[in-house]
Image (cartoon, rainbow, N blue to C red):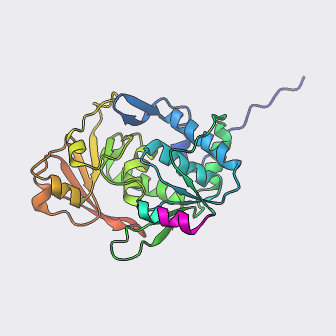
Amino acid sequence: MTKQQPKQQQPTHALTAPLCSQFSSALPLFVLGDRVVSRREFWQMVADRVAYLREQTTSQYALWTDNAPVFLAWLLAVVCVDKTLILPPHQPFLDALLNDDSDIVLLDDSVSVARSDLDTDILTRTLTHTLDNKAIIFYTSGSTGTPKAIKRTLGELIAESLTLLEYFPVLQEAMVYRSVNHQHLYGLTFGLFVPLVGRGVAHLLQMSSPETLGNISQTGGQAHRVSVLVSSPALLKRCAGVFDFAVSVIISAGGVLSRTVSVQYKADVIEIFGSSETGVVAWRDGK
């Protein structure tokens, strides 16, 4: 009688190991009020979108949605099927992009997908295989002219997030809120990828208005976590002396934050310096 060989587990690349270890995890990744999206549920979302995209003939996609788990699931799925993903910096840019190029297909909240099998071996192999593909196209804000396209790989995003977790251990298990858009590299890295790669939890939606940020409360059973706000000097200046956010740490990027502004907040302040081209290159204590 021949013994059946046990199923061989796919070897995991060092950069994809933090992701692949989550496939069956019930730990939370996103929260909004009492709504919780577990890591297992999130990776099911990715698998569903990978199956959908494999049936399509399109080679280029534009991604636009405020829903963070949907956004991140589409991003990872497009990379997994070896297609190109464009992240428009703002709505007028997206409108012009779709008008100028009929071959680009929009991925947003209106695209529905069927549930598929979550084959962890295939997903592990696919993530590892596509790590170095220049599949993700960001754009600079265009504040100094026309927005410039920047190509990044999934491996680069994961590697930078792992480095940030080493430099800022407070982010390891933090509850992360953000006032910045995940269509840009800063918001995507600190707001979504750092919680994904670490053991943190991200708020499901961007909280861009001072009034919304002023009502931050840790729900969804996350009150035990250190709370972090990922924001910008412009919004922090507007809110200084008016709102004092209920967070332990504020991360600011996108320009220099005046000390006269940062000292008005009780939270620790970390200033991040870098660009879409380079990623994070430096930081300083904001106080």
**What residue appears at the point 44 percent right and 73 percent down from the top-left corner?**
148
The verdict on residue 97 being magenta is yes
Q: Which of 138 and 38 is in front in this view?
A: 138
Q: State whether residue 6 is above or below residue 14.
A: above
Name the magenta segment's main secondary structure: helix
Q: Which of 135 and 242 is in front in this view?
A: 242
Q: Nearer the viewer, residue 215 or 222?
A: 215
Q: Nearer the viewer, residue 186 or 91?
A: 91
Q: Give the range drawn in magenta.
A: 95-102
Furthest residue toward top: 1
Is 267 displayed left or right of 39 in the figure?
left
The verdict on residue 98 being magenta is yes
Is 265 displayed left or right of 175 in the figure?
left
Furthest residue toward right: 1
**What residue appears at the point 37 percent right and 52 percent down from the top-left corner?**
190
Q: Where is residue 91 in the image (x, y as percent from the top left)?
A: 42, 60
Q: In which quarter of the image is the C terminus?
A: bottom left
Q: State whether residue 129 is above or below residue 203.
A: below
Q: Quadrant of the N terminus?
A: top right
Please indicate, yes or no, whether residue 68 appears anywhere in the rendered image.
yes
Q: Position of residue 68 (x, y in %)?
A: 43, 45
Please indicate, yes or no, whether residue 11 appears anywhere in the rendered image.
no
Q: Where is residue 268 in the image (x, y as percent from the top left)?
A: 19, 49
Q: State whether residue 47 is above or below residue 54.
A: above
Is 66 displayed left or right of 9 in the figure?
left
Q: Position of residue 157 (x, y in %)?
A: 47, 57
**Which of the 4 quarters of the picture holds residue 213?**
top left
